[in-house]
């Protein structure tokens, strides 16, 4: 599946093994600023990127260099958005908006009626962004060292 990018912009495609270093670099660049705020590395920084790519969970955008990505997993009754990461150099260019649109399209293509995700409670920027894209808070829960706000979007 490839999103319909505006003319001249790269689409979104499944990541391949050669993308793993870029997936790691974009994820680290996107989440690194939160380490000081939340007191530990955000979970996406600890992910096994090679395994996620091999499992077909990662979709990337950017040519020739990857500038954004999503990690999604089909689960019973919903698509789980594990991570959305945009390199700071690409902020403000619609990359995140296109990635979130892709997630909706992907869920629909799989016949799933909703998308779910969570974000750390101290990542307040995300708590402003997700409602703009139709997500609603379902709960706040502590999972291990993470204070998480859970969201869902019904499609």
Image (cartoon, helix red, strand yellow):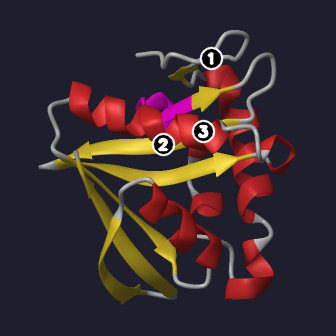
Q: Provide the residue span drawn in magenta.
A: 51-59
On screen, 148 above or below 22?
Answer: below
- Do we see residue 130 in this rendering? yes
Image quarter of the N terminus: top left
Q: Quadrant of residue 31?
A: bottom right
Expressed as whole percent of the image width and height from the top left, the position of residue 20 reads: 67, 33
Is label 2 in contact with label 3 (beta carbons under 8 Å)? Answer: no
Query: Residue under circle 2?
Result: 100
The extreme top residue here reads 7
- Per the rendering, the mark at residue 31 is none
Report how far apart the C-alphas of labels 1 and 3 lie in the structure.
17 Å
Comes first in the chain, label 2 or label 3: 3
The 10 Å Cα crowd at callout 3, few under 14, some 14 to 19, many 20 or more, is many
Please, what secondary structure does the residue beneath circle 2 have?
helix
The residue that appears at 44% across and 53% down in the rendered structure is: 133
Query: Residue under circle 1?
Result: 6
The residue that appears at 23% across and 31% down in the rendered structure is: 108
The extreme front residue here reads 132
Expressed as whole percent of the image width and height from the top left, the position of residue 36 reads: 79, 83
Is label 1 in contact with label 2 (beta carbons under 8 Å)? Answer: no
- Do we see residue 57 in this rendering? no
Q: Is residue 56 left or right of residue 121?
A: left
Q: Is residue 111 left or right of residue 105?
A: left
The residue that appears at 17% across and 39% down in the rendered structure is: 112
The 10 Å Cα crowd at callout 2, few under 14, some 14 to 19, many 20 or more, is some
Query: Residue under circle 3?
Result: 69
Comes first in the chain, label 1 or label 2: 1
Please, what secondary structure does the residue beneath circle 1 have?
loop
């Amino acid at each position: 599946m490839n999103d319909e990018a505006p003319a001249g912009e790269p689409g979104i495609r499944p990541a391949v093994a050669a993308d793993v270093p870029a997936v790691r670099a974009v994820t680290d660049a996107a989440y690194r600023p939160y380490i000081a705020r939340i007191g530990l590395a955000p979970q996406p920084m600890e992910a096994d990127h090679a395994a996620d790519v091999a499992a077909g969970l990662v979709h990337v955008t950017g040519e020739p260099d990857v500038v954004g990505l999503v990690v999604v997993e089909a689960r019973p009754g919903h698509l789980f958005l594990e991570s959305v990461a945009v390199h700071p150099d690409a902020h403000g260019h619609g990359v995140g908006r296109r990635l979130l649109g892709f997630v909706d399209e992907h869920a629909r293509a799989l016949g799933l009626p909703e998308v779910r995700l969570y974000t750390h409670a101290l990542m307040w920027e995300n708590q402003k962004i997700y409602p703009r894209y139709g997500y609603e808070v379902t709960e706040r829960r502590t999972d291990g060292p993470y204070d998480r706000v859970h969201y869902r979007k019904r499609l």
